[in-house]
Amino acid sequence: MFWAPEVLAAVVPVKVASAADLVSASQPLLELTAGQVRRAVDGWHAVLRVGAVDHRLWSKEPPVLGASYAAELPFDGDFGARAYAARRLWRAMNGRAPGPAFHTLSKQRRERLSAAIRALDAHSAGGSYRVIAEALFGKKRIPDRAWKTHDLRNRTIRLVQGGLALMRGGYRKLLRPGRKDE
């Protein structure tokens, strides 16, 4: 199977089930055409809603009406995330709670990302670090003197740098969580 590097780790790659897959299947197999399917340069992408959860799938081949599908999990760096996503899909297809998503951002991380994007926006509009800090932290917290050595100045600079890193492609790390050798 051609493996597209653009496919995210939480996307379950599928293929038309072979006769052996059908014989050994004790649970219902996937009906790919039941979801929202779109064509892309790397293959076919589908979003299946099972219960209240969206499951994302990818196939090199176009969907076949009436065919059953099986997950195909390559032993690559994203195996753990893909196996987790496939298990969530399997649980949902069998009427069980799918469980939590593989990767969720903490409230603190979401707030920091939001602040970094706001800081980037203000910086791109020509705002100084002091003006950005006043908008983010409130004017009362910004000292009249000792601004050059104040912690909020350093924090504002780091937020702008973080926003610039996101803009330059770092946002992809949010979609593909850090890999841990298991």
Image (tube, rainbow, N blue to C red):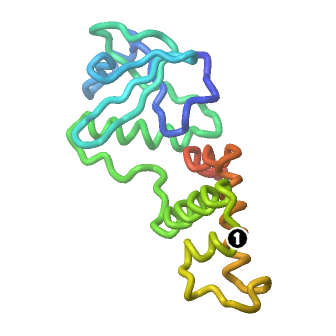
**Left or right: 40, with 166 as reference point:** left
Crowding at label 1, few (<14), some or many (≥20) Cα neighbours within 10 Å? Answer: some
State whether residue 26 is above or below residue 79: above
Element under label 1? helix
Left or right of 171 on screen, residue 95 = left
- Nearer the observer, 87 or 105: 105
Q: Is residue 47 left or right of residue 106?
A: left
Q: Quadrant of residue 56?
A: top left
Q: What residue sits right under mark 1 in the picture?
A: 129
- Say if 177 sits above or below 49 in the image: below
Residue 32 x/y as whole percent: 33, 19
Name the quadrant containing residue 121. Answer: bottom right
Please name the amino acid that badge 1 sits on.
Tyr
Rendered position, 112 above or below 82: below
- Taking the spot 23% from the left edge, 44% from the top edge, the residue there is 96
The residue under the point 50% across, 70% down is 108
What residue appears at the point 70 percent right and 70 percent down from the top-left corner? 129
As drawn, is 59 to the left or to the right of 50? right
Rendering quarter of residue 126: bottom right
Rendered location of residue 159, percent (x, y): 66, 66
